[in-house]
């Protein structure tokens, strides 16, 4: 039986009565048992076209999800129903928020396409922000601000938003923004003087109810450009959150809000300089410690020197790599370095040592568990058990020395 979709003609319907057509047991995506209820008519919107489903109650049962099964709308509820009359009540704040975002999206998409030649290829209405993906050249900041300004001008004009029905051919004659290849009677949303677009979603009656549109950012998504925006009450929340964040950052940087960008630039430059100096100092320290270590490690018989060093602290992995590399600069030296509890190990050799550090690492990783990689002369790995580092170093030394 086809479910009559009450939201097609009245998106503002908050409560309604209907008859239960069927009720079957099901399982929610979170694993809990549910019931799938089909009514003869419904005001609950199912997830479709980038817009999430409505929430609310049918009698005293919570509606957890709403699914479009072609001709029927399936309500996922927490308890079952017998055939008969039920009363549906929508979570109105959620529905109205979705209407604000969806109508705002139609308005923005129309402006991006008509004024800037950027058609919308997809739309997503999120719980906090919404996005539209545009195809074409990268929208400049001037384009983004221009689209936002034009959208808000239409909002302030308080233009009517109406539902139209007609065939694809008829809608094409009326100047539909995006033609669809479907037969039969189609539903379209018209924003007076701005847009006409086939759509099955819920929408406002006036553009003024969108409130204010705010375009937040634009990023590259594969071959398209994703524009993030908010409308209505979300704009207020986002504006307050952005202002609060700007104020907190300004306090951290000890500057006025309008100077945050400049102060942040200075902080990044200072950080990069400190990082560069710290890295240089780290390398000098590793080389100095390697020199002292080599003085205490005489060459073994046959001229091969194997140096094993086990660290038991939370130090920097980069230091271990630099230390092993510095040790391996010495003629015919193999360096086996590791740290616990992080489980990092570094194997390095002077080319004249004639061993294979990559094969060595693969062997101990196979025996003790872990992963890593590198070259014949230098490898790094991470053990599954960080406490096994000392055993691994002893095993690696035994392999190198042929014991």
Image: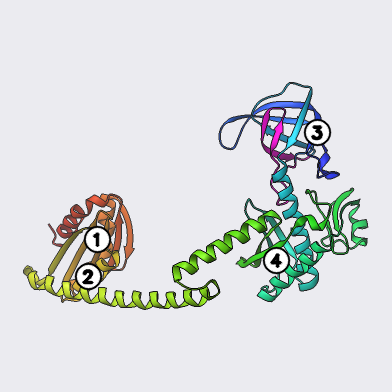
Residue picked out by circle 2: 323
Q: Is residue 69 magenta?
A: yes
Can residue 350 be seen here? The reply is no
Q: Is residue 92 magenta?
A: no
Q: Earlier in the sequence, mark 2 or mark 1?
A: 2
Residue picked out by circle 4: 134
Q: What residue is shown at x 80% (from left), y 33% (from top)?
A: 16
Judge from the rendering whether residue 4 lies leftward or rightward of residue 308; answer left or right: right
Q: Which mark is residue 360?
A: 1
Q: Provide residue 261's location: percent of width, then percent of height.
A: 52, 75
Q: CA distance from mark 4 to mark 2?
A: 50 Å
CB-based contact (under 8 Å), mark 3 and mark 4:
no
Q: What residue is shown at x 68% (from left), y 73% (from top)?
A: 139
Q: CA distance from mark 4 to mark 1?
A: 52 Å
Q: Give the SS element for disc 3.
A: strand
Q: Give the SS element for disc 4.
A: strand
Q: CA distance from mark 2 to mark 1?
A: 19 Å
User: Residue 218 is drawn in which quadrant?
Assistant: bottom right
Q: Which residues fall within the magenta stretch?
A: 45-70
Residue picked out by circle 3: 16
Q: CA distance from mark 3 to mark 2?
A: 74 Å
Q: What residue is shown at x 69% (from left), y 39% (from top)?
A: 55
Q: What residue is shown at x 31% (from left), y 53% (from top)?
A: 370
- The answer to which of 26 and 258 lies nearer the viewer is 258
Q: Provide residue 253's location: percent of width, then percent of height.
A: 45, 71
- The answer to which of 264 and 222 lies nearer the viewer is 264
Crowding at mark 1 (Cα within 10 Å: few <14, some 14-19, many 20+):
some
Q: Earlier in the sequence, mark 3 or mark 2?
A: 3
User: Residue 134 is drawn in which quadrant?
Assistant: bottom right
Residue 142, placed above or below residue 61: below
- Disc 3 versus disc 2: nearer the observer: 3
Q: CA distance from mark 1 to mark 3?
A: 73 Å
């Amino acid at each position: 039986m086809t479910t009559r979709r009450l939201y097609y003609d009245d998106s503002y319907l908050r409560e309604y009565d209907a008859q239960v057509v069927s009720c079957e047991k099901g399982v929610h995506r979170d694993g809990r048992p549910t019931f799938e209820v089909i009514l003869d008519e419904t005001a609950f919107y199912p997830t479709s076209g980038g817009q999430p489903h409505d929430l609310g109650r049918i009698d005293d049962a919570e509606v957890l999800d709403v699914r479009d099964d072609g001709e029927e709308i399936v309500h996922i509820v927490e308890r079952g129903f017998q055939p008969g009359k039920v009363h549906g009540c929508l979570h109105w704040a959620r529905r109205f928020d979705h209407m604000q975002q969806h109508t705002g999206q139609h308005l923005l998409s129309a402006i991006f396409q008509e004024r800037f030649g950027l058609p919308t290829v997809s739309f997503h209405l999120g719980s906090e922000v919404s996005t539209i993906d545009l195809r074409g050249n990268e929208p400049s900041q001037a384009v983004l601000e221009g689209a936002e300004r034009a959208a808000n001008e239409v909002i302030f004009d308080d233009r009517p938003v109406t539902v139209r029905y007609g065939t694809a051919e008829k809608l094409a004659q009326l100047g539909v923004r995006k033609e669809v290849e479907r037969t039969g009677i189609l539903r379209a949303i018209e924003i007076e003087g701005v847009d006409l677009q086939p759509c099955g979603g819920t929408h406002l009656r006036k553009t003024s109810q969108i409130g204010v549109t705010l375009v937040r950012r634009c990023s590259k998504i594969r071959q398209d450009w994703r524009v993030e925006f908010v409308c209505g009450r979300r704009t207020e929340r986002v504006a307050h959150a952005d202002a609060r964040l700007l104020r907190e950052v300004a306090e951290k940087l000890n500057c006025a809000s309008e100077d945050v960008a400049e102060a942040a630039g200075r902080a990044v430059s200072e950080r990069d300089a400190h990082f560069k100096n710290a890295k240089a100092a780290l390398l000098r320290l590793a080389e100095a410690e390697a020199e002292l270590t080599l003085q205490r490690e005489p060459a073994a018989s046959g001229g091969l020197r194997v140096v094993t060093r086990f660290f038991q602290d939370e130090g920097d992995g980069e230091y271990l790599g630099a230390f092993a590399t510095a040790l391996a600069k010495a003629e015919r030296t193999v360096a086996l370095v590791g740290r616990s509890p992080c489980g990092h190990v570094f194997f390095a050799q002077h080319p004249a040592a004639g061993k294979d550090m990559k094969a060595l690492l693969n062997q101990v990783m196979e025996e003790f568990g872990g992963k890593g990689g590198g070259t014949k002369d230098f490898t790094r790995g991470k053990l599954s058990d960080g406490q096994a580092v000392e055993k691994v170093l002893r095993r690696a030394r035994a392999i190198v020395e042929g014991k």
